[in-house]
Amino acid sequence: MVRLPYLTALTTLFSYGILFVFGHLRDFFRKIFDWSKSNNLQGYAPICLGYEDFYTRRLYLRIQDCFGRPISSAPDSWFDVVERYSNDNNKTLHRTEKTTKCLNLGSYNYLGFAAADEYCTPRVIESLKQYSVSTCSTRVDGGTTKLHTELEELVARFVGKPAAVLFGMGYVTNSAIIPALIGKGGLIISDSLNHNSIVNGARGSGATVRVFQHNNAPHLEEVLREQIAHGQPRTHRPWKKIIVIIEGIYSMEGELCKLPEIIAVCKKYKVYTYLDEAHSIGAVGQTGRGVCELLGVDTADIDIMMGTFTKSFGSCGGYIAASKEIIQHLKRTCPAHLYATSMSPPAVQQVISAMKVILGEDGTNRGAKKLAQIRENSNFFRSELQKMGFEVLGDNDSPIMPIMLYNPAKIPAFSRECLHQNVAIVTVAFPATPLLLARARICISAAHSREDLIKALEVISKVGDLVGIKYFPVEPVKPNKVKHLKKIE
Amino acid sequence: MASRIMDVIANALNLITSAFDAPTGAIIFGVPIDGHLMLEALLVMVIVFQLTKKSHKPPKKPLTEKEIDELCDEWVPEPLTSDSTEETMIEPPTLESAAGPHVIVDGKDVVNFASANYLGLVGNKNVIDSCVGSLEKYGVGSCGPRTFYGTMDVHLDCEARIAKLIGMPDCALYSYGFCTIFSVIPAFSKKGDIIVADEGVHWAVQNGLDLSRSTVFYFKHNDMKSLEAILEKINSRIKEPEKVRRYIVVEAIYQNSGQIAPLNEMVRLKEKHKFRIILDESHSFGVLGNSGRGLAEYCGVPNEKIDIITAGMGNALATDGGLCTGSVGVVNHQRLMSSAYLFTASLPPYLASAAIGALEYLEANPSVLTKLRANIAFLLKELSDVSGLATVSHPLSPIIFLKLKKSTGSNKTDMHLLDSITNQVLKEHSVLIVTTKRSSLDKCPLPLGLRLFVSASHSESDLAKAAASLKKVAAVAFS
């Protein structure tokens, strides 16, 4: 849970208030100055109506240089950030040829497969020469290669389910699978902090959507009881089926989901579960098999497990693992399988090789070492940050740690100052997070060495003091004072 | 005792009867009031009393915990997937080599008409070399969305290159061709806006229309008169046209029928009725026009007249990913409001290098387009007399679409027949052609058929072999 001191909340609201007032003033003057210029829309409605892009124009553009920084090397633990300059107060940014080597605390590179790897890259290049860049065809037409079938079997074995199916992109996996599983007359109950792809998939399916409080199993039970008892809205017919959608690790909070409690509730009420392990597969668990292994939940209890290959395996694409009947059904009806270009063969080979390294099937113990390294790194970093007095979110063992900033002015200050000191940080604000809860998000990787982490901690501590975000300084331990001496007569 | 009660009752009755019978009754404020007026006043008071009383509602009884428990126990959900009493799915062929004009399936060499490899770039040595360089420098994935260190210099170079080729100021690169269109439409059109779309658009466009929550009208496939009628009807009904955004969504080459949209006529209609055009050029980018710029170049329409162009790069450019171009305002708006751009990892860098390589090839060898057109013309001529099947695609479309001359009655039996034809063609003659697949979620009403994707790298013997084998198998199937 996020702790928000009262004074900070007040000052944050005040800052946003000033920004909005100034933004409106500037809009007002802009309208007056543009009165004279002719309106060249000629009867068309403008592309952006009303205040849709107020936030973009007046708030985001001021700090545009903190986002979208281009890089010119692999997103490894150290990378080259391209310098940009602006002539018109951040409205447009231009690239230069100069680059700075920075420590990478922003990329999703949990196991360090992002850059060229000694086992994976030669195999990827070989598959590129054999199968070329793309099959230019859908999976059902002429886009299935031997690599695709091999990877589907490997994913099913890795995750612990009978069968699996691949898709070319993680976002499309959610958006195109949920409509294939549930339609009108069904109910989807999703966690309040679920990712945009799940929200889009749920909206596109036509089913009714209800939300339960983040990670709150008792509230989920309450919502389920109410919905099953009352049935569909207005007609009160019983629901055809109910699916509960949760994520393994929530990427903006770094928290693990309370899987055992939620699964217990779902089994009691006979509802189906859908687990999105985009950030947790390969990154947590003793052998990297995700949040089920970490929390001791049997994979047979979860109906559908989804994941992506972008984060821990250094590739692209997504998968769904479930029982054989469900996978057959999806292969017959899911639009992403029938209409979309199949995954690029070199990317498939990268995942196969990365999985083999993690499972230890490449003949070395690099996989086990990487998993131990990321666990150690995450726990060390988090405990050090908490000791320094930052408000750090997330659970132990989770490689994502958001540091709360709250105030809108601290976002660009923190980001720019860290970049000056050669540490590349990601800052997130509205609309990806609630308005008052802006944060800087750190993603730890197995490729970070202890020296990298210590340097990062030094820089973050220095910049944190400058910007003023050490909200909860830890009291130094006082030596036990001897209170009173009893006079012994 | 009894007599006393009788007396009291008799007195009361006397009073009442005298009150009724009294000719003048009481005199209030100098106004004589009759006895029956008292009765009427009493009745009025009763009526007012009844009116002011609340109507009787049965008390609201919320369900008790026990009742909720019973309902939850009784409820039986449907199985997650419907019982498949249908026959098992036909497994697609597994390729064992690159998807060029010839491919190895099950150890045999097969002529490949299933890949949309229009320019023959699959297996191109220069493209593969630039990809190898990219893989060694950047690795495979980009490990981050565009806003969080997922933007690499190859992405920016690729965007600039595409924008230069098409002739637009800027371009946004998406990481998957399929999701480009269903993310662009909701970014520009919201609840309350109006969209007019062709009824033959593919599922990704339909999903985008659903997600946008706008009012959607469909016009008959490629029929400009139907479009004009709908546009006029809409404009006559809107009260404030300056506040409502209106779009026409079409594909340049429809993948469900192989037809080409008549862009000239559409631009005329759009300017007359003040609509904006969203054009999906997945199968025409790199194919139509003298230098491969797409439908606008082929029809001779200047680029500024088309508002938004999207395309998937998984076809002519033989890579993966999508793009969306338009004016500067359009592209900038997408970089902040389009969900598949913001909330997902960016395109793997080696695919962006492959795209740059493909564009360089296209600029250096414009003759590949004439070869493609010659191949299409040759194959169409050979396929003009297949029994039971008729070609319905446009003469310039690289997707050759054959539909059944007489449908067997339902989509399912049509699929059976077409599948058996393609299976036989593959097994006996080693030619890979495909049927159109339809998902149960797809709302497209166009008929099913066979599709052949023609490539510039197909030789004449390949085309002749394909046509001959199809004719033989169709003759047997329809005899």
Image: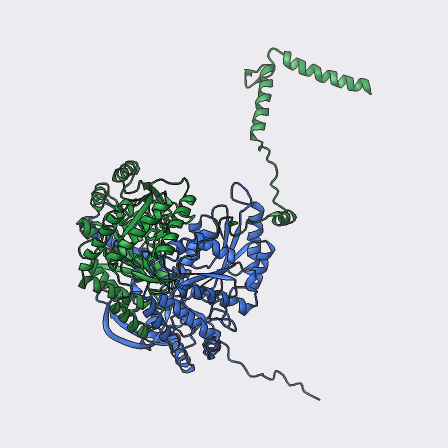
Chain colours: A blue, B green
- Which residue is the extreme one toward the bottom? A489
- Which residue is the extreme one toward the right? B1
Residue B280 in percent (x, y) is at: 28, 52
Q: Is residue B375 above or below residue B6?
A: below
Specify the quadrant of the image occupied by residue A262.
Answer: bottom right
Depth check: give the residue in front, B162 or B399: B399
Q: Residue at x 54, y 81 (%)?
A: A478
Q: Is residue B268 left or right of residue A283?
A: left
Residue A359 in percent (x, y) is at: 48, 73
Depth check: give the residue in front, B448 or A405: B448
Residue A181 in percent (x, y) is at: 48, 52
Depth check: give the residue in front, A250 or A318: A318
Q: The N terminus of chain B lies in which quarter of the figure?
A: top right
Q: Is residue A244 above or below residue A441?
A: above
Q: The C terminus of chain B lies in which quarter of the figure?
A: top left
Q: Residue at x 57, y 56 (%)?
A: A266
Q: Is residue B386 above or below residue A111?
A: above
Depth check: give the residue in front, A51 or A43: A43
* Tally of numbered tags: 0
Q: Is residue B357 visible?
A: yes
Residue B415 in percent (x, y) is at: 40, 47
Q: Is residue A26 visible?
A: no
